[in-house]
């Protein structure tokens, strides 16, 4: 039989006490580490959603300036609306028809018109989001672009069938002061 000294018992007691003291901290760390992946996954998802929405905003401009109103209209949700100076239109078919009519006389390309889309501020909330951005409509004549109109967009967006789309896009034209 081995004899245990007081020093050995004291050391063993310290080890057990330390283990018992650290156990709640270890459990808390384990819970925190378990929470990290979902937190990280949620943050990554939000970043991916933000990038997808920025891409949607840019695809809008590409389709609009290319006068590809079939592609343009598909950027809107099934019940999506577009509102602006020419009216309010609901659903991809009505939006496509309205844009074809509104841009019938405009020519895309070097001696035509184009849009600058800037300053997006996007807020993602799960499968819904909001965005605010600016637009500038330019006309080009003789290779020289000039600003014809400018304004802002206020958007609500929805993830529909796994793809971000416009639920509502409101185009507001900036007003200018009368010349003095």
Image: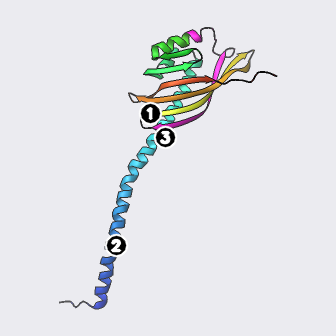
Q: What number is the disc on residue 47?
A: 3
Q: Nearer the viewer, residue 13 or 87?
A: 87
Residue bearing the label numbered 1: 128
Residue at the (69%, 17%) spot, across then down: 139
Q: Mark 3 touching mark 2, by CB under 8 A?
A: no
Q: Are marks 3 and 1 in contact (CB under 8 Å)?
A: no
Q: How is the image coloured?
A: rainbow
Please state the horizontal and vertical placement of residue 108, each as a whole percent of the image. Answer: 63, 15
Which portion, as a residue range, is magenta? 101-125
Q: Earlier in the sequence, mark 3 or mark 2?
A: 2
Q: Residues within 10 Å of mark 1 (few under 14, many from 20)?
A: some
Q: Is 71 colored magenta in this rendering? A: no
Q: Where does residue 121 sit, x and y in percent of width and height? A: 57, 36
Circle 2 is placed at which residue position? 21
Quarter the N terminus occupies: bottom left
Rendered view: 59 above or below 89: below
Q: Is residue 74 left or right of residue 133?
A: left
Label 2 packing within 10 angstroms: few (<14), some (14-19), many (20+): few
Disc 3 to disc 2, how far (Cα)?
39 Å
Q: Quadrant of residue 25?
A: bottom left
Q: Secondary structure at mark 3?
A: helix
- Tell me which label, 3 or 1, sits earlier in the chain: 3
- Comparing labels 3 and 1, the label whose residue is closer to the camera: 1
* Image point (76%, 21%), residue name: 178
| Rendered location of residue 151, percent (x, y) | 64, 25
The quadrant where residue 44 appears: top left
């Amino acid at each position: 039989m081995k004899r245990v000294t007081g020093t050995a018992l004291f050391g063993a007691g310290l080890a057990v006490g330390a283990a018992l003291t650290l156990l709640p901290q270890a459990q808390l760390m384990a819970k925190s580490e378990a929470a990290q992946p979902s937190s990280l996954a949620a943050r990554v998802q939000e970043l991916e959603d933000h990038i997808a929405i920025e891409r949607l905003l840019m695809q809008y401009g590409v389709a609009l300036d290319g006068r590809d109103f079939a592609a343009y209209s598909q950027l809107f949700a099934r019940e999506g609306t577009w509102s602006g100076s020419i009216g309010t239109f609901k659903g991809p078919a009505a939006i496509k028809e309205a844009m074809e009519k509104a841009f019938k006389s405009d020519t895309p390309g070097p001696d035509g018109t184009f849009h600058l889309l800037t300053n997006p501020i996007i807020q993602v909330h799960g499968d819904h989001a909001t965005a605010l951005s600016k637009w500038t409509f330019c006309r080009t004549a003789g290779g020289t672009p000039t600003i014809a109109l400018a304004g802002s967009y206020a958007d609500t967006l929805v993830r529909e069938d796994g793809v971000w789309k416009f639920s509502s896009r409101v185009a507001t034209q900036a007003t200018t002061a009368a010349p003095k």
